[in-house]
Amino acid sequence: MKVHGVFLVAVYFYLTYTQPVKGQLQPHEGCQTRCGEVEIKYPFGISSGCYYPGDDSFNITCKGDRPYVLGHIEVTNFTHSSQLQVLRNRSSYCDDGQGKKNISVDSNYDLGNLSTSTKNKLTLVGCNALALLATSGDKPYATVCISACESQPAADAKCDGEGCCTTDIFDEWDNNFVEIGSTRLQLPNQASVHHFNPCVYAFLVEDGKFNFSPSHDLMNLRNKTTFPVLLDWSIGNQSCQKVGNTNICGENSVCANSTNRRTGYICKCKDGYEGNPYLSNEHGCQDFNECATGRHNCSDHSTCKDKVGGFECECHFGYHFDTTTKSCKLDTKASARETPLACCSSCLALARLSGAGASNVDFKIFTEEGMKEATNSYEESRILGQGGQGTVYKGILPDNSVVAIKKARLGGDRSQVEQFICE
């Protein structure tokens, strides 16, 4: 009996430590995907089984219709590009010029397995003041910013050291505790600035999300207490090479080593796909139509042809693909009989019959009414591609013949009409 019991334990141990395969770690069905107005995107999630297991940095708490990461950092947007948009408090140092001080350091926070992005800046608003950012962890880091002024800066003053200053964040900062503070400097023969700048403020803010206004910010920072900050995240602490096919990337996605952080990996949709690269359901990476959405680089003399996972540019009749310029060039060897010589200024579409050969192309001019009927009123699902002078649709004639119909985007200019025909 004793040996039998050991055998059962050994089997259970083996099963629980069986390594997952690529994309196996998926959220349970029925997971809450919204908190107030914010969409929660996997690998983040609310409650167990809905976020990437083993790392509570991906566990989201929904309080009062607002999502929080690590229980205390409010999140305003989740992205698939390994970043979180969050709100962080500012710190302040106030004094009345008579020795009475009021210090608020509300910007201390623990980041867990997250990191502060280099796209943020340490910012100080105030005259004759210093801001300090310090971290603790495996590699402690500190930086300062100093601002000086004796009088109210000009209304159009920039944040460049007079009343306001900024400094970049070190690109290898990956420590888990952050502290930001500010203080007033005691300078020789310092003039009083309290009447227009009673407090100094220090804060982290996403680059480009704060515009300094001396007349408003030096008095009370426009009563703002929080600012947008970017946090970086990655999956685990191993590279794609080390995790191999046990990464959590979903279908039609690839594993990529994290570049924002010094550890872990992220998932990206393959070229020609979009969606959440960590999911394998209908919300995961899905093929999209580059031609219909205009996300292609086909030249004016080519037609975009959609295909699974991408697109291709097909040169128009009378043109050939130039491998040097990577574009369609006019075929100077085209014979006169290959080019239509006549048309009317009111022509609306040109169709190439599906049965035509490569060297003897059959064309037909369509009226507005005939074109609508053949394309089912320009139904979007009938779009085959886009050309420089028009849109190509799949058309079905009354005799059930399948044709490619090109609807022109032309005025009465004859040169445009001729170019349309050449395409």
Image (cartoon, helix red, strand yellow):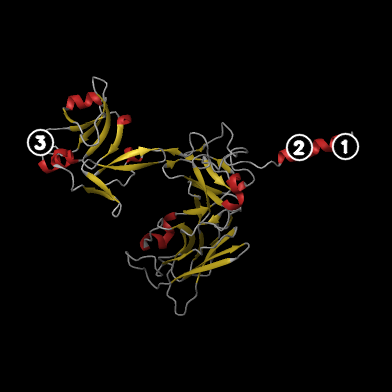
**What residue is at 52 percent from the left and 68 percent from the top?**
143
Task: Determine the secondary structure under disc 2.
Answer: helix
Is the N terminus in the top left, top right, bottom left or bottom right quadrant?
top right
Pointers 2 and 3 in contact (C-beta within 8 Å): no
Pointers 2 and 1 in contact (C-beta within 8 Å): no
Q: Which residue is mark 2?
A: 12
Q: Earlier in the sequence, mark 3 or mark 1?
A: 1
- How far across and down, in percent of the image, does residue 353 sit? 23, 29
Q: Amino acid at mark 2?
A: Tyr
Is the C terminus in the top left, top right, bottom left or bottom right quadrant?
top left
Foreground of the two, 172 or 311: 311
Task: Determine the secondary structure under disc 3.
Answer: loop
Q: Earlier in the sequence, mark 2 or mark 1?
A: 1
- How far across and down, in percent of the image, does residue 218 sit? 41, 63
Q: Which residue is mark 3?
A: 342
Q: Which residue is mark 1?
A: 3
In the picture, measured across the screen, residue 37 lies left or right of residue 339, that is right
Q: Amino acid at mark 3?
A: Ala
Q: Nearer the viewer, mark 2 or mark 3?
A: 3
Q: Earlier in the sequence, mark 2 or mark 3?
A: 2
Q: Residues within 10 Å of mark 3 (few under 14, many from 20)?
A: few
Task: Determine the secondary structure under disc 1.
Answer: helix
* Residue 300 seen anywhere in this rendered image of the structure: no
- How far across and down, in percent of the image, does residue 76 sit? 48, 46
**What residue is at 22 percent from the left and 37 percent from the top?**
359
In the picture, the disc for residue 57 is none
As displayed, is residue 333 above or below residue 259? above
